Image (spheres, rainbow, N blue to C red):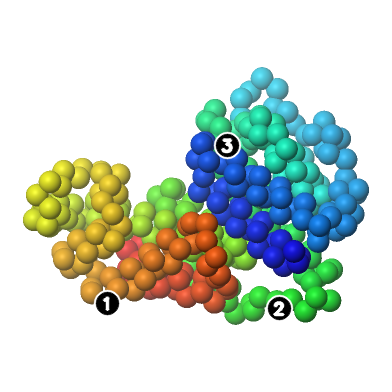
Amino acid sequence: MTIDSAIEDLTNAILDLQLADFNTYQRPVNKMALAINDPALLAINKKLKDGVDFENFIENSNSGGSMIGSANLNWPSETVAELGLAIQIIERAGSDPNWLEQFALNWYYDGNNIIRSIQKLTRSVFVPFARDYRSYLDKNHLHELGAAKISPAAKQVAVDLRNYVENISDQETRAFVEEAIQCHEYNLYRSAIVMSWLAAMDVLLKYVHLNHLDDFNNESKRFNNKWKVAKTPDDIAIMKESDFLDRITAISMIGKNSKEELKKALGLRNGCGHANTLQVGANISAAHIETLLQNVFKKFL
């Protein structure tokens, strides 16, 4: 396997981990560990790991004492040292799932919930690691292999989307949008496509709930007399996303052309959210986010 293909496997595994639940998270963790230990990366990783002492890193961090959730890792300021430590976390996680669970609960505590703590660890460590590791390889190893660099122009869409973050008062929606931006900026394009769609759907569901709930329920009941009247955004979300787009078109919340563009975006999101051979790059991710920016975020935020 080449360096580039190993990095692709790594980023895909991180995407899968972001979407995993307690029963499925071990598989993407194992895939991360396999990717980071690919023979093409072993010499590079050895150099990074040799520069840090993982046990000393843990010992010198703030364990939080008796206050649950207050533990804080004392990460070094040097990116190379951070990479060496993150590689060891991935390797240990792949070899011992119990270690990963305890590590996440201790250092990335999120309400005494294992999978939420692992997802917090993923957002805080694995996603930034993928960005910085790729950047490190690009500067030090990929040029000699002829690997193409990502065009900075493709990241402009993330700048445009950031302009709308300040308009988002709902913290859950804001978290979705910020994570989508981060994934795009970190070159995790499949993740960016999935997270930006989740953000857009969150905006649409809440907008319907606040502004069109009666019309939506009436139209849904007209189309399907078994529809149970929705009272919350979660009730609305029970409906299939494609059907949801049809219903909000019928009540004139969005136009037919917007619906067609959003259904294309939904199809891409579905392709990126499952294990398959679909390849996406900066331009596809940027176009997807631009579609959501024009048809959802600019209109309903």
Q: Secondary structure at mark 1?
A: helix
Q: Residue 113: x and y, percent?
A: 53, 31
- Residue 108 tag number: none
Q: Is residue 103 visible?
A: no
Residue kind at label 3, given as amino acid type:
Ser
Q: Which residue is mark 1?
A: 257
Q: Quadrant of residue 241?
A: bottom left
**1 or 2: mark nearer the eye:** 2
Category of crowding for the residue at label 2, using alpha-carbon neighbours closer than 10 angstroms: few (below 14), some (14–19), many (at least 20): few
Q: Which residue is mark 3?
A: 117
**2 or 3: mark nearer the eye:** 2
Category of crowding for the residue at label 3, using alpha-carbon neighbours closer than 10 angstroms: few (below 14), some (14–19), many (at least 20): many
Q: Which residue is mark 2?
A: 148
> What is the CA distance from the residue labelled 1 to the residue labelled 2?
35 Å
Q: Earlier in the sequence, mark 1 or mark 3?
A: 3
Q: Earlier in the sequence, mark 1 or mark 2?
A: 2
